[in-house]
């Protein structure tokens, strides 16, 4: 025999089960499942609207600084030299100098550009050259040399290429007029 109380209790339980099943089968996933994983890699430095540089005048070193890789991921990037057509920074990890990074405008140093004329290799689509035993360089936009020099045996040629990739090469190409 059903009583009105047991019938309404049974109806409430059925309603709760139905709602639970409907919301449990919902295609909308919670935020933690739809958000991309958090990376501790440094975010690219915002460079704003890069316009092509004057093709006959060397770029100021301060304009090149924003194209360098940002600090992060356990690395410290410290600018050490800046002048017309050139900027340089050091990469330090755990208090030890790992690499020297530089960008030079070949308008101020045509010899730097000459070594790429016979380049048979490329890095990220740009002509590349070894600079001694410890350096790797590329020529971006037929104008800017990006160079990474090892200051530690821990940084080999593959590591130098990795640091070249951390530069904002697209912004540098736009600065070169490309």
Image (cartoon, grey):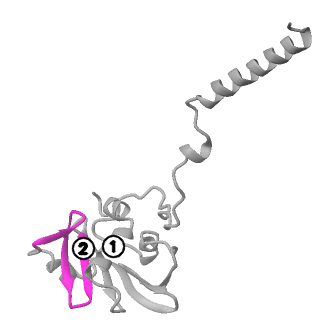
The local secondary structure at tag 1 comes to helix
Of 132 and 98, nearer the camera is: 98
Q: Would you say residue 58 is visible in this rendering?
A: no
Question: Residue 126: where, in percent of width, then height?
Answer: 21, 66
Choose between 151 and 22: the one closer to the eye.
Answer: 22
**Residue at the image point whose x is 42% and y is 77% from the top:** 61
Q: Residue at x 86, y 7 (%)?
A: 1
Q: Quadrant of residue 164?
A: bottom left
**Tag shown at residue 138:** 2
Residue 117 magenta-highlighted: no
Count the marks.
2
Q: Find out whether the residues at labels 1 and 2 contact each other: C-beta distance under 8 Å.
A: no
Above or below, 143 relative to 78 = above
Residue 157, image x and y in percent? 26, 81
The numbered mark at residue 23 is none
Q: Quadrant of residue 153?
A: bottom left
Residue 54 position (above or below residue 106):
above
Q: Nearer the viewer, residue 177 or 122?
A: 122
Tell me if mark 1 has few (under 14), some (14-19) or many (20+) residues whose alpha carbon lies within 10 angstroms of its own: some
Question: Does residue 127 sit above or below 30 in this rendering?
Answer: below
Q: Which tag, 1 or 2, sits closer to the chain's start?
A: 2
Residue identified by numbered label 1? 162
Find residue 16 and report its horizontal and vertical position in percent: 75, 23
- Residue 125 appears in view: yes
Q: Secondary structure at mark 2?
A: strand
Outermost front residue: 1
Q: Which residues are magenta?
A: 120-139
Q: Nearer the viewer, residue 150 or 3?
A: 3
Q: Quadrant of the C terminus?
A: bottom left
> Where in the figure is residue 111, as x and y percent of width and height?
18, 83
Whether the magenta-drawn stretch holds residue 123 is answered as yes
17 left or right, relative to 26: right
């Amino acid at each position: 025999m059903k009583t009105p109380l047991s019938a309404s209790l049974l109806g409430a339980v059925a309603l709760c089960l139905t709602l639970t099943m409907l919301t449990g089968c919902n295609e909308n996933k919670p935020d933690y499942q739809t958000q991309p994983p958090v990376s501790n890699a440094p975010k690219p430095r915002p460079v704003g609207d890069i316009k092509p540089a004057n093709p006959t005048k060397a770029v100021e070193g301060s304009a090149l600084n924003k194209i360098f890789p940002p600090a992060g991921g356990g690395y410290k990037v410290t600018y050490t030299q800046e002048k017309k057509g050139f900027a340089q920074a050091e990469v330090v990890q755990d208090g030890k100098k790992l690499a020297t990074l530089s960008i030079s405008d070949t308008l101020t140093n045509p010899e730097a550009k000459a070594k790429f004329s016979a380049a048979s290799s490329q890095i990220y689509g740009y002509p590349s050259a070894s600079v001694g035993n410890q350096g790797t360089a590329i020529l971006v936009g037929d104008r800017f040399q990006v160079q990474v020099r090892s200051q530690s045996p821990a940084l080999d040629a593959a590591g130098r290429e990795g640091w070249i990739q951390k530069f904002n090469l697209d912004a540098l190409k736009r600065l070169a007029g490309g």
